[in-house]
Image: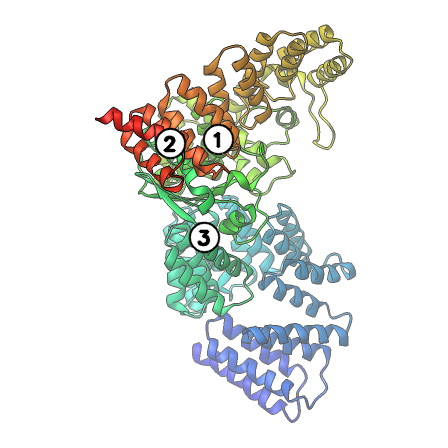
Amino acid sequence: MRTRWIGVLLTGLATVVSAQSAPAPNARVTTVGAAELAMARGDRPTARALARSVVRVYEEGQQRWSSADLTAIARAYVVLGDAESVRAALRAFDAAVAADGNNLDAMIRTGDLFLEKYNAPEARDSYAQVLTRDSAQARALLGMARVLDFEGKPEAMALTRRAAAADPALAAAHAMLARLFLEAESFDSATVAARRAIARDSMRVTPWALWGASAWLTGDSATYRQARAAATRINTRPNEFDEELAEAAVRNRRYAAAVEFARRALAADSLSARAWGILGTNQLRAGAMAEGRASLERAFALDPFHVWHKNTLDLLDQLATFRTVNSARIELVAPEAEAELLGLYLLPLLEQAYDVFAARYEYRPPTPIRLEVYPNHADFSVRTVGLAGLGALGVSFGTVLAMDSPTARQRGDFNWGSTAWHELAHTFTLGASGHRVPRWMSEGLSVLEERRARPEWGQKPSVPFIEAYKAGRLRKLSELNEGFVRPRSPTETIHSYYLASLVCEMIEERHGAVALPALLRAFRDGEDTPGAFRRVLRASSAELDTQFEAWMQTRFARPLQAIAAGDGTAPPQGRFIDVMRQASAAFEQRDLATARRLLVQADSLFPQYGGADGPAGYLARVALAQGDTATALRNIRRVTSVSETAWDANALDESWSESRGDPVGAVAALQRMIWISPVDLSVHMRLAQLAASAGDHTTAVRERRAAVAMRPTDMLEARYQLARALAASGDKTAARREILAVLESAPGFEKAQALLLELRGGTS
């Protein structure tokens, strides 16, 4: 069989050679097709030889070329694949379109090449040119769907379905559907789509690889072996099979497996830029920084168009300038200017979280756990997906975490403490489940753990959430993964996080604290979601859906009655909204009595809502306007106790607490403010003073260290105050060391001299 196939290729090569003198119709197209087939079968030498034979004639420039011939020439350049050949291919495709403005094939292939080289805007333009001429052109629809998927847009699924419907024989469309289903963990649907792709083109490795990926992810070893055997019959060294498996593993958070599949792919083809890139990216995700960089450098040398790899290599250059600070089990990597400050808070926080999660999930991940903190959100995004534009705040690859620094966003955009807690929770749920926990459950547990950690942390119910839930715009439990990977609206993803956390909360409430860890172990043992539910909860997915609906109707009975269902395109309506509008109008008109009456009514309609724009926040403003600071403080604390980003409310909480002689309340508000943003020096100074007055020397020392870490204008004074705090804490050795450093810089600093004498007197 293989001998016959090579003979066909050689016949094609002979045809091209004879075509130099008298080209036969379609000879070049036939030869290029043979070259592409040889490449698909893993025979790179033959593929390149065939492609060069076509290119050589073209570059001699002695003939006129038709649009079809120019398209074939471009395809030959694509097979050659080096940087200059890629540029030549684009020129040849352009020439083909110039020769025939209706050459849709050339336009589509131009888009394919642009997308293969990570230029989504140019790819989109190419596909759009085709779709303006033929809106049902299946290959162009598929290309546009691939652009959307490249950009992380949820519309990719619908457009891929359109492509498959426009041309049911298009194997690539069914293969794309299989990939999208795998990402959503819809493994049954992925298997069906992969089998359809195989039925339409069984001589390509990709459909078999996708079938094998679905089988591997579900633990179906027999089907996996069958798929690999079929791929091996097509290509005895099927690197593409393992590359597809590696990418499926990544999309399902199986990063260690992705490394192994990439290594297998490289064993089959050491010149695969794709495999080197997958290997390097996932070595970095595992914390193997030097090895990951070396692999990415190999990938980029083979494919200098790969913007993800270029971005990541640039980021690694920047990361080399970061500083590392450590605690017993946590390694914090942050910019030199921020590492000391952030380490004061993150290291003890994550050490505490480690102990909490280890007890809860009966699992201890290997240490150190590495947390990278980026002061530029685009850099964090590159670390995560290779491109700027990711909307997330943090990511967990297991024992390597990355997140935005508090300086990466505007104050009040997020809580960096709860974000770090959230990401470390993933480390435990991924590890305890062998990285097999469904996306919805891992995210739901992380959000639930935020709320458990501190009452103000984590997501809380909101008017848009209740409106969307009541309208049926959120997914059922059995479909919840779709809400994360393919949201139907801009708000569905954030609502899905909260919804998933409520599912986890309901499971624990009904089945006890052992249920959630037991589910993780069931996933580790290879159970799918229905199987895990039957094993641990003794219920089917449909029964869980029914139970959860009843639980939600009880949990949010009042707001579900008081907020109208909507389609998400207009402002929410309902009794709660109407009463709040009336209350706001009364407050603006200074009719405080009416405003207060209406706000109390609104509060009874949605008692769980604690946003600053809700009843509690307005009631605080009404009370303050009436001179009732006690009531104002009580209501503002209803906001600060449930809202993790309420900087202004916490500032009022702190101010009113101090004015009423409540230093404990003031300290609590300042502590919360630091987790919203740690870069306000005055907050650290006030907290240090209050803590010292209360005899909390540990907090006072930490806050004086924070002030020094922020490099204030008067550094000598900051270090002097740190020395005083250390002395008050009883650590006279550290205090003396600090004050000597101050006097070394300013020998005449009298306050420092006096403190040094005091310290010496205390030790004589």
Q: CA distance from mark 1 to mark 3?
A: 29 Å
Query: In the rendered image, is residue 534 in sight?
Result: no
Query: Which residue corresponds to mark 2?
Result: 752
Residue type, numbered disc 1: Val
Q: Is residue 102 above or below residue 724?
A: below
* Outermost residue, bottom side: 21
| Residue 521 in the figure: left or right of residue 60 | left
Few, some or many residues within 10 Å of mark 2 (<14, 14–19, 20+): many
User: What x and y, as percent, mark residue 497?
Assistant: 53, 33
- Residue at 46% across, 51% down: 250
Query: Which residue corresponds to mark 1?
Result: 447
Q: Is residue 530 above or below residue 110?
A: above
The quarter of the rendered structure image containing the N terminus is bottom left
- Residue at 54% across, 36% down: 479
- Residue at 48% across, 42% down: 403
Q: Which element is circle 3 on? A: helix
Q: In the depicted view, which residue is nearer to us: 569 or 370? A: 370
Residue type, numbered disc 3: Leu
Q: Counting residues from the N terminus, which is met first, the one under dot 2 or under dot 1?
A: 1
As drawn, the label of residue 319 is 3
Q: Which element is circle 1 on? A: helix
Q: CA distance from mark 2 to mark 3?
A: 38 Å
Q: CA distance from mark 2 to mark 1?
A: 47 Å
Comparing labels 1 and 3, the label whose residue is closer to the camera:
3
Q: Residue 516's quadrant in the figure?
A: top left
Few, some or many residues within 10 Å of mark 1 (<14, 14–19, 20+): many
